Amino acid sequence: MDCPIKKQCGSCQYIGMDYSKQLSIKKEKCEKLFPHQRVHDVAGMQNPYFYRNKVIVAFNQKYEYGLYEETSHRIVPMKACLLHDEQTHLVLTQLQKMLKKYRVSIYDENRNRGFLRHVLIRRAVTTNQTLVVLVGREAVMKGSKNFCQELVKACPSVQSVVLNINNRQTSIVLSKQEKILYGKGFIVDKLCGLTFKISAQSFYQINHEQCTYLYHQVLSLLDLHKNDVILDTYCGIGTIGMFLAQYVDTVIGVELNHEAYKDAINNAKMNKIHNIHFVHDDATHFMVELAKQKQKIDCVIMDPPRAGSTQAFIESIKVLQPRQVIYVSCDPSTQARDLKMFNKIGYKSRDVYPVDMFPHTNHIESLISLSRVS
Ligand code: SAH
């Protein structure tokens, strides 16, 4: 399939390339990074398009919407994109008409004038619910009641509209200040048999199908026992830990972002999972403390951001001596660096399982399972 905007936004480095070729390039990259491991074929998607459940666009003064050009702040107008689903574009096209009709002014970053800075769309693909976040410079949007009613009538998948108020001169899209204009301020999605509330700020994996695959892969690599205590570190809104809780005695999730931590607690309550606890802390600090207390930990799941984990985190593993560590990574190069540290403390892995979480881009998700050898 051809990219309708001819790759100008720069997000999809591999678009237009045969999908099986993309997968083999990603496998080769992993083989280079992990010369002593058996790298499995990259788990790809049946239909590697329209998978992104979150998009942030900006509008220009002509009310065209799109992504920024790779190297500038020029908006590349986009009628369609091969990564976003049809509903996303229906909602965006409707918004485009209505922003014009309601004469909503568009933010001009050079003059720091105008109202609308960005629009964020989140989709819950299993329930077909859409959350619309309008990022505006002021706390009041004139005519918002009629605006929302008209939007929801035209696009019934829209369950909620939120105004995020961002009046700082910054390239960070969302501020912490929000006002619900319509609905409850969140949408609900189902993942691995559980229900999750997704609000404007929540971290949520952007590819539902591959995320489901990844979590099942984590489960299949784990050798779990009923009385195990497992740690879900860098846990986000608690999705992996909640999925695993049914197989073990206790799960402890640790997460640095306060919003995600709060979402995790609420999600556990909503799913009536009582054997999971969440801690709001830096994962390394938490591990070092656990190591001082010599806590019994059977398995550790770690899913750090691209920067990977830390030496102190890994040294705490040496003290805690879990039977197994599952390392999920969105940047195999830092994972390969961390693997060397694991080897030094006596934890080894044999296999690397790459997952194509982000088809058409050069990003790779990968999974390794480490076991204590001594
Ligand atoms: N496992 C989750 C989230 C993975 S993304 C999932 O599958 O959805 C990585 C998470 O690590 C993010 O939620 C981020 O907020 C969190 N994080 C980043 N740095 C951290 C740190 N130093 N300590 C704990 N959590 C951290």
Image: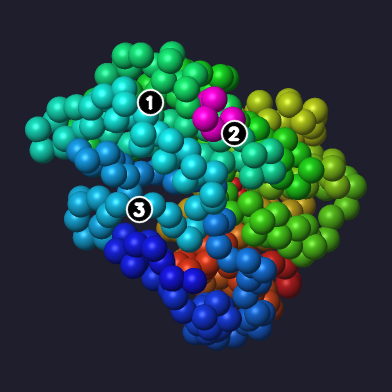
Which picture quadrant has residue 135?
A: top left
Region rendered in magenta = 152-156
- Of the residues under marks 3 and 1, which one precedes in the sequence? 3
- Is 255 positioned to the left or the right of 179 in the image? right
Give residue 264's position: percent from left, percent from top: 63, 33
- Of the residues under marks 2 and 3, which one precedes in the sequence? 3
Q: For the point 25% across and 57% down, which residue is it?
A: 69
Q: Amino acid at mark 2?
A: Ser
In the depicted structure, whether residue 22 falls above or below residue 163: below
User: Cα distance, mark 2 to mark 1?
Assistant: 20 Å
Which picture quadrant has residue 223?
A: bottom right
Q: For the point 20% across and 50% down, which residue is it?
A: 73
- Of the residues under marks 2 and 1, which one precedes in the sequence? 2
Crowding at mark 2 (Cα within 10 Å: few <14, some 14-19, many 20+): some
- Quickly name the residue at label 3: 78
Specify the principal SS of the magenta part: helix
Which picture quadrant has residue 235?
A: top right
Nearer the observer, 36 or 356: 356
Q: Amino acid at mark 3?
A: Met
Nearer the observer, 301 or 43: 43
Give residue 259's position: percent from left, percent from top: 51, 30
Does the CB distance between marks 2 and 1 fall below 8 Å?
no
- Quickly name the residue at label 2: 157
Badge 3 marks a residue whose secondary structure is loop
Q: Amino acid at mark 1?
A: Asn
Does the CB distance between marks 2 and 3 fall below 8 Å?
no
Asked if residue 30 shows in the view, the reply is: no
Q: Which mark is residue 164?
A: 1
User: Cα distance, mark 2 to mark 3?
Assistant: 21 Å
Image quadrant occupied by the C terminus: bottom right
